[in-house]
Image (cartoon, helix red, strand yellow):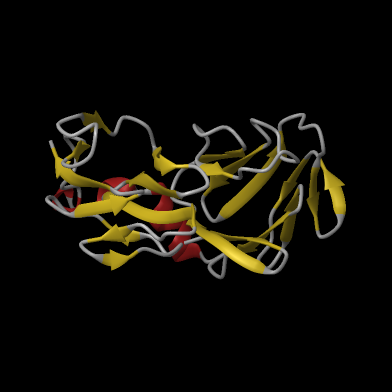
Amino acid sequence: MPKMIVSIDGVVIKEVQLTKDRTTLGRRPYNDVVIDNLAVSGEHAVLQMSGADVHIEDLNSTNGTYINGKAVKKQLLKHNDTVEIGKHKIKFLNEAQGAGFEKTMVIRPSAAPQADAPVAGGAAIKVISGAAAGREVVLVKVVTTIGKPGVAVAAITRRPHGYVVALVEGVDKPTLNEVPLDTEPQVLKNGDVLELAGTKMQFVTL
């Protein structure tokens, strides 16, 4: 499965698996991949996946999109390409590019067992401590960010077979069931407890 490794100044800040036909990148929180930097446009670029091929298209961004140092409007990404957006570098990895069996898996999603979709009814986050205790937030977006910018922020991402959570930023790392989160996505299960910025929340499937 293709993936992107996002880094700034040589430090990896997140790793993103490409699971959808269309993945957006930008500064606004509703993007699939949020890059919170003023050099990045609100809607900067989009990745479009067809079989094992992934194209990147610049969405008329202010500072442009670069691949291996060259400005591009739309281009097919190759394994080990480096995409530059603002000060961020995104390494594109797609070891299965061109492999026939990978394309077959992508274009035949109906072959996947239905039992692999335990969260078909969606999920929510219930606040169980702090000033907002009792509040419930239904996870309607592909990516939902929670927390306080500058203190601790985590992102919950909906995938075809469930939800995952990963650290976005924070001096005080959020915890999942009292284990510190990092930028590697962790699978969420019904009843899991997240704690960040002094607030406890419970992940529940609907």
Q: Looking at this view, is 36 or 69 the one in front? A: 36
- Tag count: 0
Q: Is residue 146 left or right of residue 43?
A: left
Q: Looking at this view, is 49 or 164 the one in front? A: 164
Q: In this view, does 80 lie to the left or right of 165?
A: right
**Which residue is depicted at the point 52% across and 47% down?**
150
Q: Looking at this view, is 3 or 167 the one in front? A: 167
How far across and how far down the image is residue 89, in percent?
71, 58
In the rendered image, is residue 111 in sight?
A: yes
How far across and how far down the image is residue 124, in percent?
21, 36
Q: In which quarter of the image is residue 131?
A: top left
Q: Is residue 137 left or right of residue 71?
A: left
**Which residue is depicted at the point 49% across and 59% down?**
171
How far across and how far down the image is residue 83, in percent?
73, 55
Rendered position, 111 above or below 34:
below
Rendered position, 21 above or below 28:
below
In the rendered image, is residue 93 in sight?
A: no
**Which residue is depicted at the point 81% across and 60% down?**
68
Q: Quadrant of residue 136?
A: top left
Q: In this view, does 143 lie to the left or right of 8?
A: left
Q: In which quarter of the image is the C terminus?
A: top left
